[in-house]
Image (cartoon, rainbow, N blue to C red):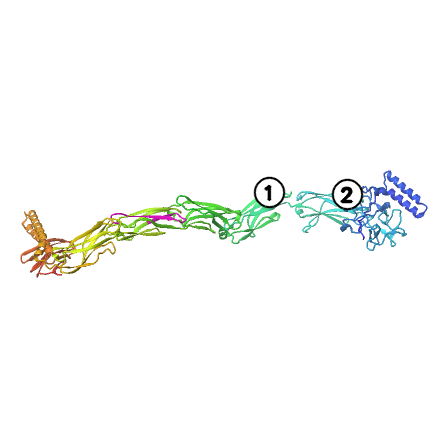
Amino acid sequence: MRTNPPPHSLVSSDRYAAIGDCLRSKRHDLRAVRSSLAIGVLLSVVLCGLLLTAGIGTAAGAETDNTTDDFESGELLEIENQTNVPLATGSFDDTGYYGHDAVVTFDGDIVRGENAAGDETPKDPTITVNGEDLMVADDGTVETITDGRHVTTSDGNKTVTIDDNLVVTDDGIVELADGTSLEVDGASIEYSAYDQGIPSTNVSADGDYSEGEQLSVTVDITNVGYGNIRDEVELYGVDTDGNVEDRLIGEPEFINESGGNTTSLTFERELVAGDHQIDELRLDILSEQFTTPINITKSEIAITNVETNDPVAGEPLTVAADLERRGALDLGDRTVTLSVDGTEVESRSITLAQGASTTEEFSYDTGDINASEVDIAVAVPEDSNTERKAVTVVSKDAHNERMSATVINEPTASLSEELEVVANIDYDGTVPGGETVVPTTFRIGDSVEGERNVTVEDGAPTEATFSTYLDSGSVPLTSVTVETPGQSDTLEFERNLSTKFTDVDESFGSEESLDAVVTVENDGETPEVVELTVAVDDPDGVADDGSETVMVTVNPGESVEKGFSFEPTEDAPSEIELTAETDVSSDTAVAIRPAFTVEDVKLEGADNANSGLTMSGNVTNTGERADTQSVQFNLGDELVAEESVTLAAGESKTVETSIEPPAENGEYSYNMTALNVSGAESAQKSAQINVSGKSILDRVTSLGLPLALLAVLALLAIAAVALKYRDDPEALQAQLLTAKSRVQNAVQGVVGGGGSVIVENGLPRDSTVRLQIKDESGVVFQEDLQLADGEQREFPSLPGDGQFEVGVGVDDVASHSEVFQGATSDIGVVLQPDGIRIGEL
């Protein structure tokens, strides 16, 4: 297997001039008389060693010590020296640059058989034959890299190995150290780079530079070849983007450097506006270019950052621009502008000292923006600096829709404690500007209880607590709502109020009150303030209006008892239904009145009714309370008597009454009834009543007492009139006639007789009227009347039989009279403007 040994570099120095002279001399002698002068060669070598030991040095010593010294001269051809070239062992790592077929390495001024660092190695350190590279094979022999042909001495007696020392002649031919020529198939071994100078550069431009500063660049050029470097060196500033032409840094420098030596050069330039575009330094030498990056800061006011809010339409768009003064050039005043959607909306002038920074804030009214997104640009036009940013403008409706409220507790409603509602106020999505104000309303039912603005920051809701005290005007509590312009949250409060009679008199009587207790219980979630009304179904059965109303206040989980009392009357029905009612619930109860039963009803005196009738019965209170009830007596179809009966519970009593007999004989039904007890009517009975034995005398006798009383009253009236008008005969006579008429009317009302006279004033004014009635015996009635317009008055004063006359006179109307026969029913008198009319009705 073949290996690719690393390249060996070749080196020469003026220090080796003496050795070179010795080697050339001995080589010439060897060629002339090789067999006879071997000892002379040896002596020459010893002499060279002595010279090196004295201060000049020997090649053998350099190879052995592997020391590193700088080149003193690169004039290999001029001094015609030859250099030992030991073959290298191992492999060379940097095959990408030097190739895989190098067989020599170069380290300072020493040629040695081991690898050297890449930057110390000549560019093309390979030994070739007819242009074909050589290599060290696995067995240590040197051969061609392509077909493995060995390198031998020209006489073919020796194959070159890794152990042999090689030298390079002045013309670049490689030989054994003893001058023996080497070849491959008759072709000489060559080292083509024996007379070339090879630059290795180090460009140092430490630190960052700014326009307006002095750029100073140090360039170290080391000749790593065997020949000299003679060339003009130029350093350029390059814009790799090609926006500007290359700019020369300083002036060109000429160098003449031998192999192994280093030259340091310094290039300087005053950086001007536009030099910030230079991003690379390029060194030109020997038609080669060496580059290194560089950073030059522009002299400007730079926009380092732009921050904005995300405004809601109608609110200000705020822009904060961070500005920094860079570079060393004198900038003077600069302009900073704000543009919205390509239109400049604000411009201002700023001045910053070198290295200073500031923040410029702008505000723009978004009221005229219809788009959901706008492009803003902050610019410094003099420096061609612009920073752009897309800004979201949230519409008012969308902003409001993102607001929400969520009630997070379970509030307890009570009239004795504060109602507290806790809600999370949130914003769906990114909050414009990092925080926003959410208008929040707290409602009790439909009434606004409170309003506030709640600040919500981006990323987390804000907890808000609302509290209030409930009063009678705010209950029942149907709901509480926490409301935002977007979503709201409502808690419904259930009403569950029951009304129940918990204690009520099962029976009642007119002698005691009817009492009831009503319990109102609240199993709902809201306090209640309600009207509780207890009423009876028959208001006439109790005193007052049969209804009582009270206000009831009851919190959730509580109950309230209220008492009511009614006073039943004698006319109360047999049962009273009580109703307890609120606007939510109701209950009913029934109280029973004690039942009065009527038994053993009798009718006495029916055989001889002329002496009177008596009806009686046994009445019993079957209830548990004392009571007073009305007992009615019925004969035929008529109510003939009524008695009020009071009985204690369980008490019985016989109740009787005298009744007038009927006018005619016949079969009559009769019974007794306690009217307020359904079904308490006694059994229907009947009896034959006989009234035929009644005489005229009985009738007269029955009228005797009333007529006697009337007579006494008439005498007293006449006496009073005579006493009052004793001095006025005419007035006395008129008043006596009037008194007589009134007595007649009273007697007629008792015993019966003629009809009535009805007088009506049809005149359009109040009038004084004199009414006079005469029969065959004279004036039987006379009276002066004061009648208002339209007034009507009746006088039952007509005679019962015979002819009579009715006369009427008015102060300014002609008097008029009419004559009527007996048994006339009623006479009508009408006063009219055209006369007086008198006629039968």
Question: Residue 359, can we see it?
Answer: yes
Residue 823 vertical position relative to residue 121 in the rendered view, above or below: below
Question: Residue 317, can we see it?
Answer: no
Q: Position of residue 662 (x, y in %)?
A: 14, 58
Badge 2: residue crowd in 10 Å (few <14, some 14–19, many ≥20)? few
Looking at the rendered structure, the kind of residue marked 2 is Thr
Q: Position of residue 751 (x, y in %)?
A: 10, 56
User: Residue 528 magenta-drawn?
Assistant: yes
Mark 1 secondary-structure assignment: strand
Task: Identify the magenta region.
Answer: 509-532
Viewer-nearest residue: 173 or 510: 510
Q: Is residue 570 left or right of residue 773?
A: right
Q: Position of residue 324 (x, y in %)?
A: 61, 44
Looking at the rendered structure, the kind of residue marked 1 is Ser
The C terminus: image quadrant: bottom left
On residue 263, the disc is: 2
Kindly give the residue lying farthest to the top in the view shown: 54
At x 39%, y 43%, the residue is 416
Viewer-nearest residue: 153 or 823: 823
- What separation in Å lies between label 1 and label 2 (alpha carbons)? 43 Å
Which residue, given by chain and number where applicable, does mark 1 sit on?
357
Kindly give the residue lying farthest to the right in the view shown: 36
User: Residue 426 magenta-drawn?
Assistant: no
